[in-house]
Image (cartoon, helix red, strand yellow):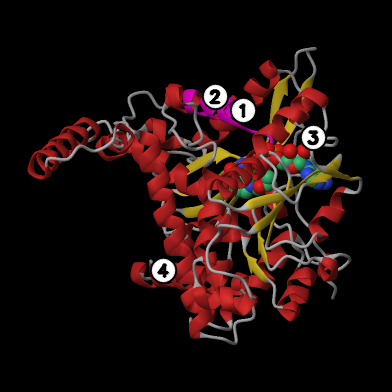
Amino acid sequence: MSNSTYSFFQSVERSFDKAAEFTTWDKGLLEQIKACNSVYSMRFPVKMDDGRIEVIEAYRVQHSQHKTPCKGGIRFSDEVNQDEVMALASLMTYKCAIVNVPFGGGKGGLKINPKKYSAYELEKITRRYTAELVKKNFIGPGIDVPAPDYGTGEREMAWIVDTYQSLKPGEIDSAGCVTGKPITQGGVRGRKEATGLGVFFGIREVCNMPSVMQKLGLAVGVEGKTVVVQGLGNVGYHSAKFFREAGAKVIAIAEYEGAIYNEAGLHEDEVFQHRKATGSILNFPGATNIAKSMEALELPCDILIPAALENVINASNADRVQAKIIGEAANGPLTPDADEIFVKKGTLVVPDMYLNAGGVTVSYFEWLKNLSHVRYGRMEKRFTENMNTHILGQIEDLTGKKVSQAERNVIMHGPDEVDLVHSGLEETMITATREIMSIWEANPSIPDMRTAAYVCAINKVGVSYTELGIFP
Ligand code: NAD
């Protein structure tokens, strides 16, 4: 059977089975880890602005409750179907396990094109969906915590939390029923850039591993590396920004209208502003146009970051991709055929399943903030600043020397919420990268880093189920 004859959920199961061979778990336990525990398929009517009644097709899937609550975004898209939501929910279980976020996987989807509805219609649809979830006990800070995904954002999350709170008055932790909320509604600072920053932290850690760099014939460290980014949306923009700030050179950026190339490096924000002003990234001053956007993926570079769509690197172009490292910022940018080609070529593919986990990691921090009812940094910021000022004063007195004002600002600074969120994300991505790499190193017959990531996930979920025991 060719890859295309498998459904999305079946291909996730295939990758799981491939990785399961490198574990020693009981077959039955592996079946349990793989299965979607609860699938809620619903239909509900909503009255549109013109008085018509439309029946909305919607889903919420809880793949695993080995840790609770379940966690995963809600997607508004014409393409939504039960199989897709099941696949995405299972990927969430594995993703959370790898980055040590103590949640089971979940996902929601509404089969609608949000562009076809007015804001008021979307509000009614979102609120009704939330009410359906409440009725069936499919949402709650300790049960299942949705987040944004394709076609949804802060606005929808604010409607969800408001609906939940009106149906569950007095529930003290109710703000934790959904994440990705606006800051004023219990959101956390640092969420917007989280996925791009996580991509950067993950790749930087790989680049800091001498044995890995030696195999790829690259120097250790991110500095000086050439990077090509596909997609200048949220994830692509922030990935490019953090690579540039760390001294890497973003030599090409691809968007759907074409790509631009400059050997000396591109500044993502200047490109972004140019696109905003002219409607296209093409004709950016100092850069060369590449008319066929996809050709940018084949440029010689050290690191390729596909941050736009799924399946962009496949059997038809993988052979021509020259990057040494591919960081899967998007979900599913490589097909299984491309994976096989890169194993043969010795290209390192850093898998989406954990590399783009920055969003869910920071969602976890948002949920913790909601349960603790206090902003990160509020308790310690002034204390730390006062203590640092005191220590610095003592050092200056004892040495008779003065520290420069710039250094003084750095040393004295007590942590703000965004500092702590970035720091927590950095720790998470470094730990996850090391865990996956050590599994791969310990078993060289594992073909690629994706399989090693699955093994990492299966082992963690396996331990969790084993410790829970089987409820009679
Ligand atoms: P986005 O909509 O902000 O950005 C996507 C960008 O890709 C847009 O600028 C779009 O114009 C561009 N694009 C579309 N078609 C293209 C093409 N053919 N060639 C080149 N560029 C093209 O979306 P995003 O939030 O940045 O998400 C990008 C990917 O990352 C998706 O696969 C998403 O599932 C994944 N992801 C996002 C997050 C997150 O927190 N936003 C988290 C995990 C994974």
Label 3 and label 2: CA atoms lie apart by: 43 Å
Furthest-top residue in this view: 50
Of badges 3 and 2, the one in the foreground is 3
Mark 2 or mark 4: which comes first in sequence? 2
Task: Residue 318: name its quadrant.
Answer: bottom right
Mark 4 closeness class: few <14, some 14–19, many ≥20 residues within 10 Å: some
In this picture, which residue range is highlighted in magenta?
A: 149-162
Q: Is residue 53 left or right of residue 457?
A: right
Mark 3 or mark 1: which comes first in sequence? 1
- Circle 4: element type: helix
- Circle 3: element type: loop
Task: Determine contact: label 4, label 1, CB under 8 Å.
Answer: no
Of badges 3 and 1, the one in the foreground is 3
Furthest-right residue in this view: 291
- Name the residue tied to disc 2: 159
Mark 4 or mark 3: which comes first in sequence? 3
| Kind of residue sitting beneath label 1 | Thr
Of badges 4 and 3, the one in the foreground is 3
**Viewer-nearest residue: 332 or 303:** 303
The residue at label 2 has a CB less than 8 Å from ligand 1: no
- Name the residue tied to disc 4: 465
Question: Can residue 312 be spotted in the picture?
Answer: no
Label 1 and label 2: CA atoms lie apart by: 7 Å
| Kind of residue sitting beneath label 3 | Pro
Task: Residue 311: name its quadrant.
Answer: bottom right
Vertical placement of 110 versus 197: above or below? above
Query: Where is residue 117 shown, x and y percent of the image?
Result: 76, 22
Task: Residue 101: name its quadrant.
Answer: bottom left
Task: Determine contact: label 1, label 2, CB under 8 Å.
Answer: yes
- Name the residue tied to disc 3: 285
Query: Where is residue 206 shown, x and y percent of the image?
Result: 53, 66
- The numbered disc on residue 126 is 1
